[in-house]
Amino acid sequence: MPCPPIPQPDSDDVVDDEMINDALSVTGGGEWSTAETLDLSFRRVANIDNIVCFDRLTSLSLSNNRIKEVKNIEHLVTLTSLDLSFNQIEALPESLALLVNLRELSLHSNGLADLTTIDKLPQLSVLNVGRNKITALESFLPLRKLDGLRALTAIGNPCADKYSDDYESYVLAYLGSNVRWLDYRVVEAEKVAACKEQFQNELEALASSEGIKKAEAVQAERDKIFRAELQQIYLLEAVTLFDVLIRRTSTYPRSLAWRASRIWRTRLAPLRCSGRR
């Protein structure tokens, strides 16, 4: 075993060495560091702090347990599939976004009221959030950021039951450009086109808003780069001034003026002219 045993409290709700070794034995055993699959479902797990030393883990199942909080799995960056269905999760941590290779995520039958953080998983293609506590159709809008999302399951949420046909039309209108499977059924192009026409005005307004936000984000990034360059320039000026003063040469005024002029011509002026202010 690549990692030393971790001291564990006497409780059946904590992932410990014995539980992990037992789970690995089902799939043929092997070292933790080389295991690619780990199934800890149906083990009454509530605390998942100790899933460590898995350098190649791609599939992790923690379904049908008693997990309320998702934490300390952000180091499992090789994960492509994560099953957290049938637990008691009510919120997702920002650290989940660190699982940048995650493609399949199941959160079926939990207590989620929104989809915060999920939109920050760039590779996600299969998402199951059925039977949660999502009441607002607008909760699905962040998923528009997931260009690779192909399969979505959300049936069983209050919003789907309450709005019935409107739920399907809404989801297809706003997500139909990417999603190919909705609630285990194939999405037909004709249906998507009809839904988009139904929500045409809303989609146009949203597209305009998203365009503005995107432009603001681009400008913010440019401003960030500009400020970083300015800091470098100010540092260069400070070093130049210090160099001149410490040497106390007779050419101090000319030297300083020449260097300041050179800094302006080569660094500051081009930045100002580029419009990044």
Image (spheres, helix red, strand yellow):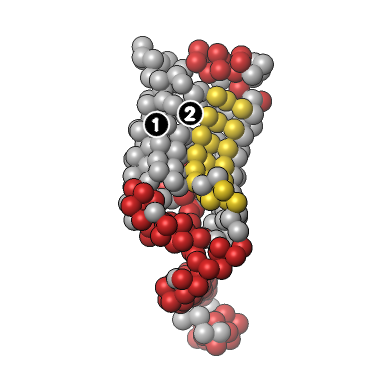
On screen, residue 141 above or below 77: below
Mark 1 or 2 closer to N-term?
2
Within 10 Å of disc 1 (Cα), the crowding (few <14, some 14-19, many 20+) is many
Q: What's under tag 1, amino acid-wise?
A: Asn
Q: Residue at x 61, y 27 (%)?
A: 37
* Residue 144 place in picture, x, y as percent: 50, 61
Within 10 Å of disc 2 (Cα), the crowding (few <14, some 14-19, many 20+) is many
158 or 39, which is in the foreground?
158
Please state the horizontal and vertical placement of residue 95, each as a whole percent of the image: 44, 44
Disc 1 to disc 2: CB gap under 8 Å: yes
Q: Left or right: 11 with respect to 270?
A: left
Rounded to the nearest angstrom, the CA distance separating label 1 from label 2 is: 8 Å
State the residue in front, 95 or 230. Answer: 95
Residue kind at label 2, given as amino acid type: Leu
**Quadrant occupied by the N terminus:** top right
Q: Position of residue 98 (x, y in %)?
A: 51, 45
Question: What residue would you read off at disc 1?
Answer: 87
Q: What element does badge 1 sit on?
A: loop
Q: Does the image show residue 142?
A: no
Asked if residue 32 is positioned above or below residue 178 in the image, the reply reads above
**Quadrant in the rendering for residue 7:** top left
Along the line of sight, which residue is nearer the eye, 8 or 204?
204
- Pointer 2: what residue? 62
Q: Secondary structure at mark 2?
A: loop
Place residue 71 in its image quadrant. Answer: top left
* Closest to the observer, 44 or 69: 44
Number of numbered discs visible in the structure rendering: 2
At a point 60% along the width and 51% down the height, the residue shown is 186
The residue under the point 39% across, 51% down is 160
From this viewpoint, is residue 143 visible? yes
Q: From what the image shows, is residue 123 above or below residue 25?
A: below
